[in-house]
Image (spheres, grey):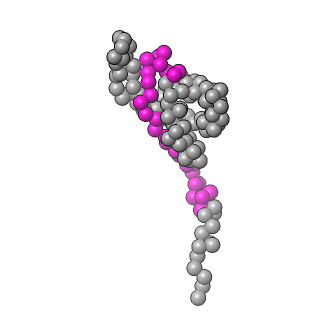
């Protein structure tokens, strides 16, 4: 189920806070990659209870959508850092990210006309005998 406009704005602000924090920490790569990402869904997974206090957090899975060239640059190490940064901003709201799933942005109509010419398939054809 897609996020409501209010939910989208809320999670986008958290994503932006994480991007600014990454930049402040000197991780320009993560900050730059996040500029093209969008939170498209959040799934509530579990309730987490603190062993040392009465606090309860809601564990969520965050779905990020980005173009393919961005998805493949978001390494496991960058995802772990992103999870930590977003959790820092969500903690006061009683949520914690348990998992981040990356989704490719859907191709626009006419993708074959854009992709096939870039493949240079004519170079792979067998010569006539």
Find the magenta span and give its range.
88-116
Left or right of 29 in this view: 7: left
Please identify the quarter of the rendering in which residue 121 is found.
bottom right
Query: Measuring 52% from the left and 39% from the top, which residue is drawn there?
Result: 77
* Quadrant showing the N terminus: top left
Which one is in front, 23 or 41? 23
Q: Position of residue 128 (x, y in %)?
A: 60, 85
Q: Whole-percent x and y of residue 69?
A: 59, 47
Residue 37 picture location, percent across and down: 57, 36
Q: Is residue 100 covered in magenta?
A: yes
- Between 39 and 47, the one lying in front of the other is 47
Residue 27 lies in quadrant: top right
* Vertical placement of residue 122 versus 98, above or below: below
Residue extending farthest front: 52
* Extreme-top residue of the structure: 54
Residue at 48%, 15% (x, y): give it: 92
Q: Does 91 lie within the magenta span?
A: yes
> Is residue 7 in view?
no
Image-based side of 5 in relation to 52, left or right = right
- Locate the C terminus by quadrant: bottom right
Please name whichever residue, 81 or 13, is drawn nearer the observer in this view of the structure. Answer: 81
The structure residue drawn at horizontal position 58% and vertical position 76%, both measured from the top left corner, is: 125
């Amino acid at each position: 189920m897609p996020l409501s406009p209010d939910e989208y704005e809320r999670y986008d602000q958290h994503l932006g806070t994480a991007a600014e924090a990454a930049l402040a920490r000197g991780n320009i790569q993560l900050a730059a990659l996040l500029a093209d990402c969008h939170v498209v869904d959040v799934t509530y997974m579990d309730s987490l209870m603190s062993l040392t206090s009465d606090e309860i957090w809601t564990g969520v899975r965050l779905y990020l959508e980005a173009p393919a060239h961005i998805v493949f640059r978001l390494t496991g190490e960058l995802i772990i850092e992103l999870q930590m940064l977003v959790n820092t901003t969500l903690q006061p709201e009683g949520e914690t990210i348990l998992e981040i799933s990356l989704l490719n942005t859907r191709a626009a109509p006419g993708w074959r006309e854009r992709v096939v010419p870039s493949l240079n398939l004519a170079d792979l054809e067998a010569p006539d005998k």
